[in-house]
Amino acid sequence: GNIVYNKAPGFLKQAEFYLGETEFKTAVRAFLKDHEYNNAEWSDLVSAFERSSGKDLKNWADVWVKKRGLPIVRLKRSSFHSYKKMGQPHDTADIYSLAQENVLGEESLWQMKTRVYLKFDSDRTEVKEVTLNNKARNPKNGFARYWVDIQSNPNFKPNTPKLVFPNYNDHGYGIFLLDFRSRKYVLENIKDEKDDFLRSMMWGALWDSVRFAELDPMEYINLALNNIDVEEDVTTISSILGRVNTAFTYYLSDARQKEIAPRLEKLLIEKMRSGKTQGERITFYRAFLSAATSEKSRNLLKELLKSSISSPTVKEGRKDTDKVTPASKRMPDLAVGLPKLRTRDKFDIAKRLIILGDKDASNLLDELEKTEKGDAAKRYAYAAKAGFATKENKAKYWNDFINNKEISESWIEAASRVWNSPRHSKLTLPYLEKALAELPNHKQNRKIFFVNGWVASFIGGQKGVDALEKINNFLVKNPGLDLDLKRKILERVDGLERAVKIREKYSK
């Protein structure tokens, strides 16, 4: 999935930029013509690229197609000094470079062309093209450095940019990390950037800094809360709020969550009511549902659910924009401007209240089950009940997951995500190794995507070092584990490792 939907488009976009638009299009036309009625391999496409560009692309293509992983490209800054006489004041110039590392520590390096955006104190801007190739200095052991020609003044007169932004316009493939000075500039000026696409890349670059434990996640959350008004594109807003939710859930300690929660909830509630479009209001509502923890927020959700239980349910499958709930005495203020709730929406609220341990959650779910009778409603209700945080309930559902042959895969998939709520990680931690031990059986007897969901649910429900130790112990004790299953585990463990590292660094 990731190769098809993420790497392949990135490869083609880089190929167009690396070879040139004309050469790329010529090659693609020839490739399609040559294989109009035949199958083709990736090497056939590379051969077409070679013919149109006149370049030897074997090494370039081998790394892009045959090698796993991706590059981490860091912006590096070095200072050079020019002395008129030793001991006297000197001129200083900053020289920037891009340092590429293989994320897996292997020797492979990605040859690519990218752009670097420069902004100076006078607000003058420049765009530099940088080619990362095998001619770079020290291209050994998975590391290489590529110089960015910024300071060309022979007298070393100061000409230092206040922002050096790598991978401008997103032609490159990899994780591009900012240097401290550029990160500081983005944090202070992101709200003033008028280029929507560049601003969205700035949000992404800052998030990468959070994931690499180079930026406090609380700083990112506060930045988002202070500047979300700048964004008008719903996709961008949704992306930022998703990162905020990840940071809040996995990267903050309990104490820091309590510190920021009131402000986060307040903003989401305000935006649910005042968003410029219905799409915005729905986006903020979904974020609120994921973040709600306080008594005030729970009461708002209960009002919304109570008012919807007696109202007609919008059929599943309708678009979110089909109908809008009017303001009325029956509907709470929270619902004004939002679509009528679907069956799933109602159970999502009940599920959230159950996970939070709200005292009214059980009764509300009972009332909901009386009015929602379809097959989908039964599945939603079963999943919601997996959220009751007791040892007995966790044990009952675990037995269902493993031994109850009457429970369908779709029911297990829905319930396992709720059962593994990060808020219940202490209750579910004892089951983690047992869940991993079930993977060979699931691979043999379940549908292909069931295994992915199982791994995501059980590892995604953890955020502590104890869970990381259990997973590592499981891998050590099972050296013969199917390689595909091991890689699925490692892919998910990456997020857990980051959470542990970030919480350890910023929660003290």
Image (cartoon, grey):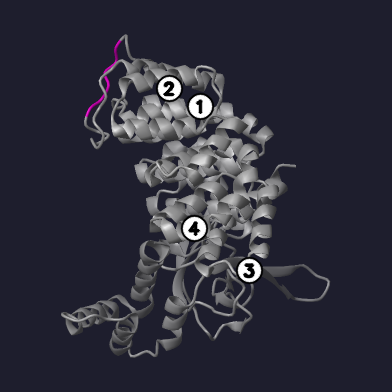
In this rendering, is residue 287 above or below 160? above
In the displayed structure image, the side of residue 416 where residue 91 appears, left or right: right
Tell me the quadrant of the picture where the C terminus can be found: top right
Tell me the quadrant of the picture where the N terminus can be found: bottom left
Mark sitting earlier along the chain (2/3): 2
- Distance (Cα) linking label 4 and label 1: 31 Å
Q: Is residue 325 magenta?
A: yes
- In magenta, the rendered stretch is 323-328
- Front residue of 221 and 507: 507
Q: Residue furthest top?
A: 329
Q: Are marks 2 and 4 in contact (CB under 8 Å)?
A: no
Amino acid type assigned to the residue bearing label 4 in the image: Asn
Amino acid type assigned to the residue bearing label 2 in the image: Leu
- Distance (Cα) linking label 4 and label 3: 17 Å
The disc at residue 441 is 4
Secondary element under disc 1, as helix, strand or loop, is helix
The disc at residue 354 is 1
Secondary element under disc 4, as helix, strand or loop, is helix
Q: Which residue is mark 2?
A: 365
Mark sitting earlier along the chain (2/1): 1
